[in-house]
Image: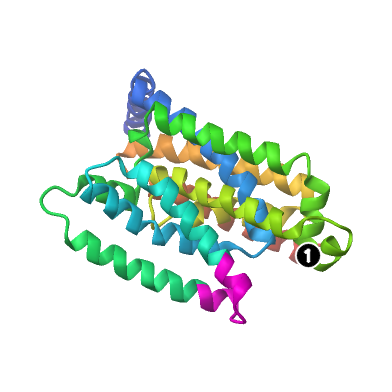
Amino acid sequence: MILEFSWVAIAGVNNLLELLQFPFMQRAIAGAILMGILGGFLGSFVTLRQLSFFSHAVGHAALVGVALGVLLQLNPTWMLLPFTLAFGLVVLYLIDQTNLSSDSVLSVVLSGALAIGVILSSLIQGYRGNLMGVLFGDILAIDTTDLILTSLVLIGSVIFLLPTLRQQILLTLNPTVAQVQGIPVRLYRYAFVVLLSLAVAVAIKAVGVLLVNAFLVIPAATAKLVSHHFTRFLVISVMLGVVSSIVGIMLSGLLNFASGPSIVLVQFLLFTFIFSWVKLIWKTA
């Protein structure tokens, strides 16, 4: 039995090495690294600013953009980018202009967007491969354009957030104090929403509409379990995002699983392991 398991393991490694020779797998690995960095980086701010439901709403509402792209026979990615951006900015504007809680505004707008998305989806005739692919994700299908878009969003995020990291941390911890000290809180909030919306749009093709929020939140939530120092927390979050993405792709290629769910499953298992490990340390301390 041990010998049989060894042969299976060797065959799996050989299959993986063969897969790595294909351009689509190489693009998938590159995409995993880029999206892992982007997800871990922005996810750190999403988690601390309690914007998880916001990214969840933007991701699910993107169904409208996907359905419009399919109906108009356009690349869904080019419809996702402007739609998620417009949706994110409109939601933030409504939150600022009403006395309702952010959760209430998000629930209302998300429900309306989902209803429109479902109705538009029902109008699609014949083959729905593009729609289903974006709903559930397929990082193995990303192309050079997706890699360029992801790189641009990542570069934009780094250029905006890192030079203003002190202000961003203060804005995250206490927006009122940040405003008193002259930090342009409103500008920073809208700029971050733009980056977050675009990040959701480029990540949807890899992990799908249904799991894109987990892709942003789980690495940061896991990192928060082991570090309360912001810089260390940020680095750990990025590392977890990259590692889980690469391992998820390998798992997907070896076992013929869907790539998006495989990545999120690895993230969930890492969170469960680290959570159990931290709790065990606290109990024995």
Q: Position of residue 252 (x, y in %)?
A: 36, 39
Query: Which one is nearer the viewer's eye here, 62 or 279?
Result: 62
Outermost residue, right side: 181
Residue shown at the point (39%, 22%) measured from the top left:
20
Identified at 55% across, 71% down, the residue is: 94
Q: Quadrant of the N terminus?
A: top left
Determine if residue 148 is in view. Answer: yes
Q: Which residue is mark 1?
A: 175
**Residue ranking furthest to the left:** 126
Q: What is the magenta range?
A: 93-105
* Colour convention of the picture: rainbow
Q: Is residue 223 magenta?
A: no
The image position of residue 97, as x and y in percent, is: 61, 74
Q: Amino acid at mark 1?
A: Pro
Residue 250 occupies which quadrant of the picture? Answer: top left
Q: Residue at x 67, y 38 (%)?
A: 158
Q: Residues within 10 Å of mark 1 (few under 14, many from 20)?
A: some
Q: Residue furthest top?
A: 21
Residue 81 x, y percent position in the rendering? 43, 46
Disc 1 secondary structure class = helix
Location of residue 68 with respect to 9 vertically, above or below: below
Q: Is residue 193 above or below residue 159?
A: below
